């Protein structure tokens, strides 16, 4: 069966450190993988997209890697700040004429000052 | 900055009643979606809509649910004969291609 797993439900790190979140998937052939941020009671906010033929993508303090052999994506936040505290969702995007996004459960990141 | 807007922000309804959740997607977007998130659980895909028709739907989206784009701007989700387990946050999203922009959600509480 198809499955998306995010490495842990919660991750606590010290301010200034790099946070690394993991997303693993099975029985998918995603065209893209996306990362979203979700704050409590709010809708997901799109952060980054990486395509199946891309190894790495960066945006400011964010970096995403995508290994289709390992079926894994890593999401890094460098120089983390308390404002980065949120739940981060990995999402697989399958194409083929129609579109839908399938989300993982998310990892709750807490950056401690 | 353009955004997806959803109304109402919170809807309380009696079990067995019909509800309509409303969304105004971003104006030049082509793809429209409904998702739901039961408290403490993951965001789940319900349906996608493109070119004035449903393009894909999940197993959750059964005959109890329907979507409409009655005019050029609104996108609605109708839930007939609501059940207690329909209580959730319902998110509308829209996009041009590979990104999905989400609204702030409607919290539906079925009592």
Image (cartoon, rainbow, N blue to C red):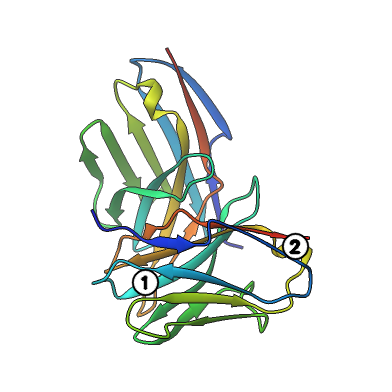
> Could you tell me which quadrant the C terminus of chain A lies in?
top left
Query: Where B81 sits versus B99, above or below?
Result: below
Foreground residue among B72 and A16: B72
Q: Position of residue A55 (x, y in %)?
A: 25, 46
Residue visible at 31% across and 42% down? A65
Label 2 lies in what chain? B
Residue visible at 64% across and 72% down? B60
Foreground residue among A18 and B84: B84
Callout 2: SS: helix
**Label 1 to label 2, Cα distance in Å?**
30 Å
Residue visible at 34% across and 86% down? B51
Give the residue number, with chain letter if any, for mark 2. Answer: B85
Numbered circle sitting on residue B49: none
Mark 1 vs mark 2: same chain?
Answer: no
Numbered circle sitting on residue A95: 1
Q: Position of residue B87 (x, y in %)?
A: 69, 59
């Amino acid at each position: 069966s198809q499955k998306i797993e995010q490495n842990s439900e919660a991750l606590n790190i010290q301010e200034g450190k790099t946070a690394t979140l993991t997303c693993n998937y099975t029985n998918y052939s995603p065209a893209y993988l996306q990362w979203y941020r979700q704050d409590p009671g709010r809708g997901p906010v799109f952060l980054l997209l990486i395509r199946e033929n891309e190894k790495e993508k960066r945006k400011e303090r964010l970096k995403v890697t995508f290994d289709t052999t390992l079926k894994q994506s890593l999401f890094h936040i460098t120089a983390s700040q308390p404002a980065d505290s949120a739940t981060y969702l990995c999402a697989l995007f399958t194409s083929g004429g129609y579109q839908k996004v399938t989300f993982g459960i998310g990892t709750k990141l807490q950056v401690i000052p | 900055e353009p955004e997806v807007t959803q109304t109402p922000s919170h809807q309380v309804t009696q079990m067995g009643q019909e509800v309509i959740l409303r969304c105004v997607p971003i104006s030049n977007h082509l793809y429209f979606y409904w998702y739901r998130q039961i408290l403490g659980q993951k965001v789940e895909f319900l349906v996608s809509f493109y070119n004035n028709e449903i393009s894909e739907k999940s197993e959750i989206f059964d005959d109890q649910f329907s979507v409409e784009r009655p005019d050029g701007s609104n996108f609605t989700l109708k839930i007939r004969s609501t059940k207690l387990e329909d209580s959730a946050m319902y998110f509308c999203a829209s996009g041009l291609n590979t990104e999905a922009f989400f609204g702030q959600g409607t919290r539906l509480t079925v009592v």
